Image (spheres, rainbow, N blue to C red):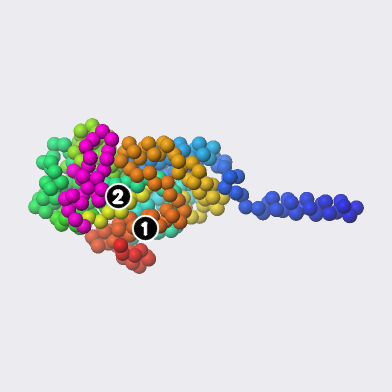
Amino acid sequence: MRLKTIGRLLMAAGLAQAVTAPVTAAEWMPERPITIIVPWSAGGSTDQVTRVVAGELEAALGGTVVVQNQPGASGSIGSKSALESEPDGYTWTAGAAQDLGTYKVLDMLDTSIEDWNLYLTVANVSVVGVNVDSPFKTMEDFLDAMKNDPSSVKVATAGLSSAGHNAMEALKEAAGGDYKHVTYDGGNPAVIATVSGETVATTQTAVEQAEMIRAGRIRPLAVLNDKPLELAGVDTIPPISDFIDGVPTAPNYFGVFVPGSAPEEVVQALDRVWSDSISTSQALQDYAADRGAVFSPYFGADAQERVKPAVSMNAYLLFDGGKAKIDPATLGIERP
Protein backbone atom coordinates (compact mmCIF):
# COMPACT_ATOMS: atom_id res chain seq x y z
CA MET A 1 0.00 0.00 0.00
CA ARG A 2 2.82 2.34 0.92
CA LEU A 3 4.60 1.65 -2.40
CA LYS A 4 1.41 2.45 -4.33
CA THR A 5 1.05 5.74 -2.44
CA ILE A 6 4.64 6.70 -3.17
CA GLY A 7 4.10 5.78 -6.83
CA ARG A 8 1.05 7.98 -7.04
CA LEU A 9 2.93 10.89 -5.44
CA LEU A 10 5.86 10.52 -7.85
CA MET A 11 3.48 10.38 -10.82
CA ALA A 12 1.65 13.47 -9.63
CA ALA A 13 4.95 15.31 -9.15
CA GLY A 14 6.05 14.31 -12.64
CA LEU A 15 2.81 15.55 -14.18
CA ALA A 16 3.05 18.83 -12.28
CA GLN A 17 6.61 19.31 -13.52
CA ALA A 18 5.53 18.60 -17.09
CA VAL A 19 2.78 21.19 -16.85
CA THR A 20 4.83 23.92 -15.19
CA ALA A 21 8.15 23.42 -17.00
CA PRO A 22 8.81 26.16 -19.54
CA VAL A 23 8.67 25.22 -23.21
CA THR A 24 12.19 25.24 -24.63
CA ALA A 25 13.16 26.86 -27.92
CA ALA A 26 13.62 23.47 -29.53
CA GLU A 27 10.07 22.47 -28.55
CA TRP A 28 8.19 25.54 -29.85
CA MET A 29 6.82 25.15 -33.35
CA PRO A 30 4.17 27.39 -34.93
CA GLU A 31 0.71 25.82 -34.89
CA ARG A 32 -0.70 28.26 -37.47
CA PRO A 33 0.73 30.72 -40.05
CA ILE A 34 3.00 33.51 -38.83
CA THR A 35 2.30 36.94 -40.35
CA ILE A 36 5.10 39.40 -41.04
CA ILE A 37 3.67 42.83 -41.78
CA VAL A 38 5.82 44.79 -44.24
CA PRO A 39 4.76 48.39 -43.59
CA TRP A 40 5.83 49.50 -47.07
CA SER A 41 4.68 48.69 -50.60
CA ALA A 42 5.75 45.58 -52.52
CA GLY A 43 9.12 45.58 -54.26
CA GLY A 44 10.97 47.90 -51.87
CA SER A 45 14.03 47.04 -49.78
CA THR A 46 12.00 45.82 -46.79
CA ASP A 47 9.69 43.73 -48.96
CA GLN A 48 12.59 42.18 -50.88
CA VAL A 49 14.66 40.99 -47.94
CA THR A 50 11.62 39.97 -45.87
CA ARG A 51 10.46 37.57 -48.58
CA VAL A 52 13.92 36.00 -48.67
CA VAL A 53 14.03 35.56 -44.90
CA ALA A 54 10.43 34.26 -44.81
CA GLY A 55 11.51 31.27 -46.88
CA GLU A 56 14.41 30.61 -44.52
CA LEU A 57 12.11 30.85 -41.51
CA GLU A 58 9.62 28.39 -42.98
CA ALA A 59 12.41 25.84 -43.46
CA ALA A 60 13.78 26.37 -39.94
CA LEU A 61 10.46 26.49 -38.04
CA GLY A 62 8.50 24.03 -40.13
CA GLY A 63 5.51 26.34 -40.55
CA THR A 64 4.01 28.88 -42.93
CA VAL A 65 5.15 32.52 -42.94
CA VAL A 66 2.85 35.01 -44.68
CA VAL A 67 4.26 38.37 -45.80
CA GLN A 68 1.56 41.06 -45.77
CA ASN A 69 2.13 44.54 -47.22
CA GLN A 70 0.46 47.32 -45.25
CA PRO A 71 1.98 50.66 -46.34
CA GLY A 72 1.17 54.13 -45.09
CA ALA A 73 2.37 56.95 -42.82
CA SER A 74 6.07 56.20 -43.31
CA GLY A 75 5.65 52.62 -42.16
CA SER A 76 3.99 53.48 -38.86
CA ILE A 77 0.58 52.03 -39.78
CA GLY A 78 1.86 48.51 -40.38
CA SER A 79 4.17 48.71 -37.38
CA LYS A 80 1.22 49.77 -35.21
CA SER A 81 -0.79 46.77 -36.42
CA ALA A 82 1.97 44.43 -35.27
CA LEU A 83 2.46 46.26 -31.97
CA GLU A 84 -1.25 46.07 -31.13
CA SER A 85 -1.76 42.47 -32.33
CA GLU A 86 -2.59 39.61 -29.99
CA PRO A 87 0.48 38.97 -27.78
CA ASP A 88 0.75 35.38 -28.98
CA GLY A 89 3.93 35.73 -31.05
CA TYR A 90 2.28 35.15 -34.43
CA THR A 91 2.34 38.72 -35.81
CA TRP A 92 5.62 40.52 -36.50
CA THR A 93 6.73 43.48 -38.57
CA ALA A 94 9.83 44.30 -40.63
CA GLY A 95 11.81 47.25 -41.90
CA ALA A 96 14.66 49.55 -40.90
CA ALA A 97 15.46 49.72 -37.21
CA GLN A 98 16.15 53.46 -37.47
CA ASP A 99 12.55 54.01 -38.61
CA LEU A 100 11.12 51.92 -35.80
CA GLY A 101 13.29 53.78 -33.31
CA THR A 102 12.12 57.25 -34.34
CA TYR A 103 8.35 56.91 -34.73
CA LYS A 104 7.95 58.27 -31.21
CA VAL A 105 10.14 61.30 -32.00
CA LEU A 106 7.84 62.02 -34.96
CA ASP A 107 4.78 61.51 -32.74
CA MET A 108 3.57 58.82 -35.15
CA LEU A 109 3.57 55.80 -32.85
CA ASP A 110 4.10 55.46 -29.13
CA THR A 111 6.91 52.94 -29.18
CA SER A 112 10.68 52.80 -28.81
CA ILE A 113 13.26 50.37 -30.16
CA GLU A 114 13.52 48.68 -26.76
CA ASP A 115 9.88 47.57 -27.05
CA TRP A 116 10.88 45.03 -29.72
CA ASN A 117 12.94 41.91 -30.19
CA LEU A 118 15.24 42.68 -33.12
CA TYR A 119 16.27 40.05 -35.68
CA LEU A 120 18.51 41.80 -38.20
CA THR A 121 19.27 40.56 -41.70
CA VAL A 122 21.19 43.15 -43.74
CA ALA A 123 22.53 46.68 -43.53
CA ASN A 124 21.59 48.91 -46.46
CA VAL A 125 23.20 52.04 -47.86
CA SER A 126 21.49 54.86 -49.74
CA VAL A 127 22.56 55.93 -53.21
CA VAL A 128 22.08 59.30 -54.90
CA GLY A 129 20.62 58.10 -58.19
CA VAL A 130 19.31 60.33 -60.97
CA ASN A 131 17.22 59.92 -64.10
CA VAL A 132 19.63 59.26 -66.98
CA ASP A 133 18.19 62.21 -68.94
CA SER A 134 18.63 64.64 -66.04
CA PRO A 135 21.17 67.47 -66.25
CA PHE A 136 23.02 66.03 -63.25
CA LYS A 137 26.00 64.15 -64.67
CA THR A 138 28.11 64.26 -61.52
CA MET A 139 27.64 64.60 -57.77
CA GLU A 140 29.12 68.09 -58.05
CA ASP A 141 26.26 69.03 -60.40
CA PHE A 142 23.73 67.75 -57.89
CA LEU A 143 25.26 69.62 -54.94
CA ASP A 144 25.52 72.82 -56.99
CA ALA A 145 21.82 72.63 -57.89
CA MET A 146 20.87 72.14 -54.23
CA LYS A 147 22.54 75.47 -53.45
CA ASN A 148 21.62 77.49 -56.54
CA ASP A 149 18.38 75.98 -57.88
CA PRO A 150 16.80 73.79 -55.16
CA SER A 151 13.42 73.67 -56.91
CA SER A 152 15.07 71.67 -59.70
CA VAL A 153 16.23 69.00 -57.24
CA LYS A 154 13.01 66.98 -57.13
CA VAL A 155 13.84 63.90 -55.01
CA ALA A 156 11.61 60.81 -54.62
CA THR A 157 11.70 58.90 -51.33
CA ALA A 158 9.54 56.42 -49.45
CA GLY A 159 8.36 59.17 -47.14
CA LEU A 160 9.21 60.98 -43.94
CA SER A 161 11.98 59.16 -41.99
CA SER A 162 12.50 56.59 -44.78
CA ALA A 163 16.04 55.65 -45.80
CA GLY A 164 15.86 57.99 -48.77
CA HIS A 165 14.54 60.92 -46.76
CA ASN A 166 17.14 60.42 -44.04
CA ALA A 167 19.89 60.37 -46.66
CA MET A 168 18.73 63.67 -48.19
CA GLU A 169 18.42 65.33 -44.79
CA ALA A 170 21.96 64.24 -43.91
CA LEU A 171 23.22 65.52 -47.25
CA LYS A 172 21.37 68.82 -46.84
CA GLU A 173 22.79 69.33 -43.35
CA ALA A 174 26.36 68.80 -44.53
CA ALA A 175 26.21 70.49 -47.96
CA GLY A 176 23.70 73.28 -47.44
CA GLY A 177 21.05 74.22 -49.95
CA ASP A 178 17.72 72.48 -50.25
CA TYR A 179 15.59 70.14 -52.38
CA LYS A 180 11.97 69.38 -53.23
CA HIS A 181 10.78 66.30 -51.37
CA VAL A 182 8.28 64.03 -53.17
CA THR A 183 6.97 61.09 -51.11
CA TYR A 184 5.67 57.66 -52.12
CA ASP A 185 4.41 54.60 -50.23
CA GLY A 186 7.64 52.68 -50.62
CA GLY A 187 11.12 52.61 -52.09
CA ASN A 188 10.10 50.81 -55.26
CA PRO A 189 7.52 53.46 -56.30
CA ALA A 190 10.11 56.16 -55.54
CA VAL A 191 12.63 54.47 -57.83
CA ILE A 192 10.03 54.03 -60.59
CA ALA A 193 9.14 57.74 -60.30
CA THR A 194 12.78 58.62 -60.95
CA VAL A 195 13.07 56.23 -63.90
CA SER A 196 9.91 57.67 -65.48
CA GLY A 197 11.07 61.26 -65.03
CA GLU A 198 8.33 62.12 -62.55
CA THR A 199 11.20 63.14 -60.28
CA VAL A 200 14.81 63.88 -61.13
CA ALA A 201 16.42 61.80 -58.39
CA THR A 202 15.98 59.29 -55.60
CA THR A 203 18.10 58.52 -52.56
CA GLN A 204 16.54 55.18 -51.69
CA THR A 205 18.72 52.18 -50.90
CA ALA A 206 21.07 50.43 -53.28
CA VAL A 207 19.00 47.25 -53.14
CA GLU A 208 15.98 49.18 -54.45
CA GLN A 209 17.92 50.87 -57.24
CA ALA A 210 20.23 47.99 -58.24
CA GLU A 211 18.22 46.63 -61.18
CA MET A 212 17.55 50.05 -62.67
CA ILE A 213 21.21 51.02 -62.28
CA ARG A 214 22.27 47.82 -64.06
CA ALA A 215 19.71 48.46 -66.80
CA GLY A 216 21.08 51.95 -67.37
CA ARG A 217 17.81 53.60 -66.31
CA ILE A 218 19.31 55.33 -63.25
CA ARG A 219 22.72 57.01 -63.05
CA PRO A 220 24.34 56.53 -59.60
CA LEU A 221 26.28 59.59 -58.46
CA ALA A 222 27.43 58.58 -54.96
CA VAL A 223 26.75 56.22 -52.09
CA LEU A 224 25.95 57.74 -48.70
CA ASN A 225 28.84 56.01 -47.00
CA ASP A 226 32.54 56.57 -46.36
CA LYS A 227 33.45 53.59 -48.54
CA PRO A 228 32.75 52.94 -52.23
CA LEU A 229 29.96 50.55 -53.19
CA GLU A 230 30.73 47.53 -55.34
CA LEU A 231 27.58 46.51 -57.18
CA ALA A 232 27.81 43.54 -59.54
CA GLY A 233 27.59 44.56 -63.19
CA VAL A 234 28.29 48.29 -62.80
CA ASP A 235 31.24 50.57 -62.14
CA THR A 236 32.22 51.24 -58.55
CA ILE A 237 29.95 53.88 -57.00
CA PRO A 238 32.07 56.48 -55.19
CA PRO A 239 31.47 57.41 -51.54
CA ILE A 240 29.93 60.75 -50.65
CA SER A 241 33.13 61.54 -48.74
CA ASP A 242 34.86 61.99 -52.12
CA PHE A 243 32.72 65.08 -52.71
CA ILE A 244 31.90 66.57 -49.32
CA ASP A 245 32.95 66.15 -45.70
CA GLY A 246 30.73 65.82 -42.69
CA VAL A 247 27.84 63.77 -44.04
CA PRO A 248 26.74 61.67 -41.04
CA THR A 249 26.52 57.96 -41.79
CA ALA A 250 25.66 54.87 -39.75
CA PRO A 251 24.73 51.30 -40.75
CA ASN A 252 21.05 51.22 -41.67
CA TYR A 253 20.05 47.80 -40.32
CA PHE A 254 16.98 46.04 -41.68
CA GLY A 255 15.31 43.02 -40.13
CA VAL A 256 12.27 41.35 -38.62
CA PHE A 257 10.86 42.84 -35.43
CA VAL A 258 8.82 40.90 -32.88
CA PRO A 259 6.80 42.78 -30.23
CA GLY A 260 8.22 42.52 -26.73
CA SER A 261 4.89 41.09 -25.60
CA ALA A 262 5.54 37.84 -27.52
CA PRO A 263 5.81 34.69 -25.37
CA GLU A 264 9.30 33.84 -24.22
CA GLU A 265 9.27 30.47 -25.99
CA VAL A 266 8.75 32.25 -29.33
CA VAL A 267 11.70 34.57 -28.65
CA GLN A 268 13.89 31.64 -27.63
CA ALA A 269 12.96 29.79 -30.79
CA LEU A 270 13.85 32.77 -32.98
CA ASP A 271 17.12 33.27 -31.12
CA ARG A 272 17.97 29.68 -31.95
CA VAL A 273 16.95 30.08 -35.60
CA TRP A 274 19.06 33.21 -36.02
CA SER A 275 22.03 31.56 -34.34
CA ASP A 276 21.79 28.24 -36.18
CA SER A 277 20.22 29.04 -39.56
CA ILE A 278 20.01 32.73 -40.46
CA SER A 279 23.65 33.35 -39.50
CA THR A 280 24.72 30.94 -42.26
CA SER A 281 21.91 31.55 -44.77
CA GLN A 282 23.30 31.34 -48.29
CA ALA A 283 20.10 32.81 -49.70
CA LEU A 284 20.50 35.97 -47.61
CA GLN A 285 24.22 36.20 -48.34
CA ASP A 286 23.55 35.91 -52.08
CA TYR A 287 20.81 38.54 -51.86
CA ALA A 288 23.15 40.96 -50.06
CA ALA A 289 26.01 40.42 -52.52
CA ASP A 290 23.75 40.88 -55.54
CA ARG A 291 22.01 43.98 -54.22
CA GLY A 292 24.81 45.95 -52.62
CA ALA A 293 23.82 45.25 -49.01
CA VAL A 294 25.85 43.94 -46.06
CA PHE A 295 24.87 40.58 -44.56
CA SER A 296 24.16 41.33 -40.87
CA PRO A 297 22.44 38.44 -39.02
CA TYR A 298 22.41 39.93 -35.51
CA PHE A 299 19.84 39.51 -32.73
CA GLY A 300 19.24 40.09 -29.03
CA ALA A 301 21.29 42.58 -27.02
CA ASP A 302 23.91 42.69 -29.79
CA ALA A 303 21.29 43.89 -32.29
CA GLN A 304 19.99 46.53 -29.87
CA GLU A 305 23.50 47.99 -29.48
CA ARG A 306 24.21 47.93 -33.20
CA VAL A 307 21.10 49.89 -34.19
CA LYS A 308 21.57 52.69 -31.66
CA PRO A 309 23.92 54.87 -33.80
CA ALA A 310 21.46 54.99 -36.73
CA VAL A 311 18.46 55.59 -34.45
CA SER A 312 20.27 58.41 -32.69
CA MET A 313 21.54 60.00 -35.91
CA ASN A 314 18.11 59.78 -37.52
CA ALA A 315 16.27 61.14 -34.48
CA TYR A 316 18.44 64.25 -34.21
CA LEU A 317 18.50 64.87 -37.97
CA LEU A 318 14.70 64.93 -37.90
CA PHE A 319 14.52 67.09 -34.77
CA ASP A 320 17.22 69.57 -35.76
CA GLY A 321 15.71 69.86 -39.22
CA GLY A 322 12.30 70.71 -37.80
CA LYS A 323 10.67 67.48 -39.01
CA ALA A 324 10.24 65.89 -35.56
CA LYS A 325 7.88 67.20 -32.89
CA ILE A 326 9.54 65.68 -29.83
CA ASP A 327 13.06 66.29 -28.53
CA PRO A 328 14.87 62.90 -28.66
CA ALA A 329 16.67 63.76 -25.41
CA THR A 330 13.34 63.64 -23.55
CA LEU A 331 12.97 60.03 -24.75
CA GLY A 332 16.40 58.97 -23.56
CA ILE A 333 18.00 59.03 -27.03
CA GLU A 334 21.50 60.44 -26.73
CA ARG A 335 22.84 62.86 -29.32
CA PRO A 336 25.50 61.19 -31.52
Residue sitting at 37 percent across and 52 percent down? 97
Q: Quadrant of residue 304?
A: bottom left
| Mark 2: secondary structure | loop
Point out the stretch of residues depicted in magenta: 221-246
Give the image location of residue 215, x and y in percent: 23, 32
| Mark 1: secondary structure | helix
Q: Which mark is residue 160?
A: none
Left or right placement of residue 21 versus residue 315 in this view: right
Residue 233, magenta (yes or no): yes
Q: Quadrant of the C terminus?
A: bottom left
Q: Amino acid at mark 2?
A: Ser
Residue sitting at 43 percent across and 58 percent down? 114
Q: Amino acid at mark 1?
A: Lys
3D distance between C-alphas at marks 2 and 1: 16 Å
Residue sitting at 33 percent across and 51 percent down? 251
Q: Which mark is residue 308?
A: 1
Foreground disc of the pair 2, 1: 1
Q: Main secondary structure of the magenta part?
A: loop
Vertical placement of 331 versus 269: above or below?
Answer: below
- Front-most of residues 198 and 155: 155
Tell me if residue 189 can be seen.
Answer: no
Give the image location of residue 109, x and y in percent: 38, 56
Is there a contact, CB below 8 Å, between mark 2 and mark 1? no
Q: Which residue is mark 2?
A: 162
Residue 129, magenta (yes or no): no
